[in-house]
Image (tube, rainbow, N blue to C red):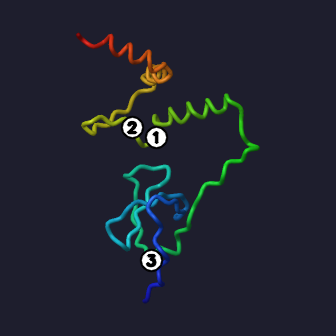
């Protein structure tokens, strides 16, 4: 059984669609394997496709450009910003310390964090100096 001539490999970082979802192309150590990470997943969800067999099932993908007529008001923009800021709570990327320990904060711990993020940087610097021993 002869394999069809594979198409050109997708470039690292490009978006592709296969198996019913969108993926980001990662670098691979093997020239015939394309590593893919789901757009909404983590590095642990990455898969490898043997390109000579599955190249015809992979399509290029892209996002539709934003529609200027569908633009909302400033309150909607602020809500979107807050949702993006809080998405780490349910995302696949919890906080990581220098020791590579995973820390998943509880919902009540986000309130002080959000309040601190809204503070002016000058206030944060002054408060930080107070806590230091002289």
Q: Residue at x 38, y 13 (%)?
A: 127
Q: Earlier in the sequence, mark 3 or mark 2?
A: 3
| Secondary element at tag 1 | loop
Where 78 sits versus 9, above or below? above
Number of callouts in the render?
3
Q: Earlier in the sequence, mark 3 or mark 1?
A: 3
Q: Quadrant of the N terminus?
A: bottom left
Dot 3, how many residues are within 10 Å of its Cα: few (below 14), some (14-19), or many (20+)? some
Is disc 3 in contact with disc 1, using a CB cutoff of under 8 Å?
no
| Secondary element at tag 3 | helix
Is disc 1 in contact with disc 2, using a CB cutoff of under 8 Å?
yes
- Front one among 14 and 109: 14
Q: CA distance from mark 3 to mark 2?
A: 36 Å
Q: Which mark is residue 2?
A: none
- Front one among 113 and 1: 113
Outermost residue, right direction?
A: 69
| Secondary element at tag 2 | loop
Q: CA distance from mark 3 to mark 1?
A: 33 Å
Q: Which mark is residue 94?
A: 2
| x and y percentages locating residue 74 in the rendered image | 68, 30
Which residue is disc 1 drawn over? Answer: 91
| x and y percentages locating residue 99 in the rendered image | 24, 37
| x and y percentages locating residue 46 in the rendered image | 40, 57
Left or right relative to 75: residue 8: left
Where 76 sits versus 28, above or below? above
Which residue is disc 3 drawn over? Answer: 53
Q: Residue at x 40, y 61 (%)?
A: 47
């Amino acid at each position: 059984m002869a394999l069809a001539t594979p198409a050109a490999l997708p470039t690292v970082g490009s978006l592709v669609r296969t198996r019913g979802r969108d993926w980001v192309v990662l670098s691979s150590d093997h020239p015939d394997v394309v590593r893919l990470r789901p757009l909404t997943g983590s590095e642990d969800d990455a898969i490898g496709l043997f390109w000579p067999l599955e190249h015809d099932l992979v399509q290029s993908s892209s996002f539709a450009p934003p529609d200027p007529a569908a633009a909302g008001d400033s309150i909607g923009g602020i809500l979107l910003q807050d949702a993006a800021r809080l998405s780490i709570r349910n995302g696949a990327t919890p906080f990581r310390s220098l020791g590579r320990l995973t820390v998943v904060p509880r919902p009540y711990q986000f309130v002080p964090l959000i309040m601190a993020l809204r503070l002016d940087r000058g206030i944060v610097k002054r408060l930080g100096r107070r806590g230091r021993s002289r």
